[in-house]
Image (cartoon, rainbow, N blue to C red):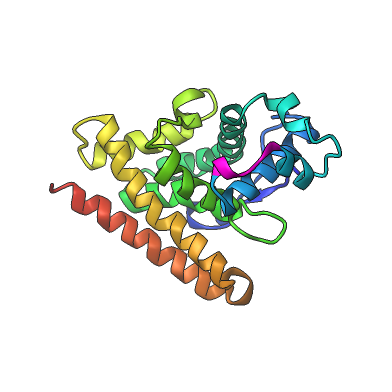
């Protein structure tokens, strides 16, 4: 379940980043988290039962989700925390490499560091389930008040916060809330491109075209942020 993540793009073309040595959760919990993310990415969070998640995780005990996580909110937060924990070292390496190069961190660089690790967060069928999950979250759960790991677990999201703070500084955000809102809108352009591409089967059938589409979505996200600097 805890697989190696390759970050062979952007400023880290010669690096291979693995997940932190400490264990995030035991194998049973990770199977449940991964199954929940996959099901949530295809359906609304409210419509998926704990029984469905337990069965998808290969657990004969259909009360396993309730036993390990208690409620849906705790399970959703565990998905956030797991994925942020996976992406943190990748983003940290990229940020450090960009800063060591001695050049100011630009919006294109920051957005690439923010979004590119998501390409590796796929299920067994190669679908970008975290992107789909995040899209539903930003459109539905976030407005309803569900917090993200960046809000609740600053110990897990240091590099994510570094990126958001530097983007906010570049766009001269009046306050962090409005700044993060701008980033979220731009982020949606990218992750929805992944979801659309998955639905078309593009990553499997035409990976070069998929990569080009991803790069275009990043350009569009950056252009939106740059435009917001003048409003």
Q: Quadrant of the N terminus?
A: top right
168 horizontally vs 26: left or right = left
Nearest the viewer among 5 and 127 is 127
Nearest the viewer among 159 and 73 is 73
44 horizontally vs 25: left or right = left
The residue shown at (66%, 61%) is 126
The residue shown at (41%, 37%) is 142
Nearest the viewer among 144 and 202 is 144
In magenta segment, residue 59: no
In this view, 151 is above or below 166? above
Rendering coords of residue 154 (x, y %) = 48, 24
Magenta region, mostly helix, strand or loop?
helix
Query: Toward which corner of the image does residue 76 lie, by quadrant?
Result: top right
99 horizontally vs 205: left or right = left
- The segment highlighted magenta reads 45-50
Query: Toward which corner of the image does residue 13 lie, by quadrant?
Result: bottom right
In this view, 116 is above or below 26? below
């Amino acid at each position: 379940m805890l697989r190696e993540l390759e970050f062979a793009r952007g400023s880290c073309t010669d690096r291979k980043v693995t997940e932190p040595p400490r264990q995030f959760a035991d194998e049973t919990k990770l199977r449940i988290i991964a199954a929940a993310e996959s099901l949530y990415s295809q359906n609304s969070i409210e419509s998926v039962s704990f029984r469905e998640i337990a069965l998808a995780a290969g657990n004969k005990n259909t009360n396993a989700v309730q036993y390990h996580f208690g409620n849906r909110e705790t399970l959703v937060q565990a998905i956030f925390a797991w994925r942020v924990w996976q992406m943190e070292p990748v983003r940290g390496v990229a940020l450090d490499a960009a800063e060591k190069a001695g050049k100011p961190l630009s919006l294109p660089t920051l957005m690439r560091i923010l979004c590119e690790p998501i390409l590796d967060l796929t299920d067994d069928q190669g679908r970008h389930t975290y992107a789909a999950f995040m899209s539903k979250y930003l459109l539905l759960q976030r407005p309803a008040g569900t917090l993200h790991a960046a809000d609740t677990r600053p110990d897990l999201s240091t590099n994510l916060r570094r990126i958001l703070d530097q983007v906010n500084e570049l766009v001269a955000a009046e306050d962090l809330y409005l700044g993060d809102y701008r980033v979220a809108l731009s982020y949606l352009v990218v992750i929805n491109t992944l979801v659309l591409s998955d639905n078309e089967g593009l990553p499997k059938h035409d990976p070069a075209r998929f990569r080009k589409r991803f790069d275009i979505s990043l350009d569009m996200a950056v252009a939106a942020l740059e435009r917001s600097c003048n409003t």
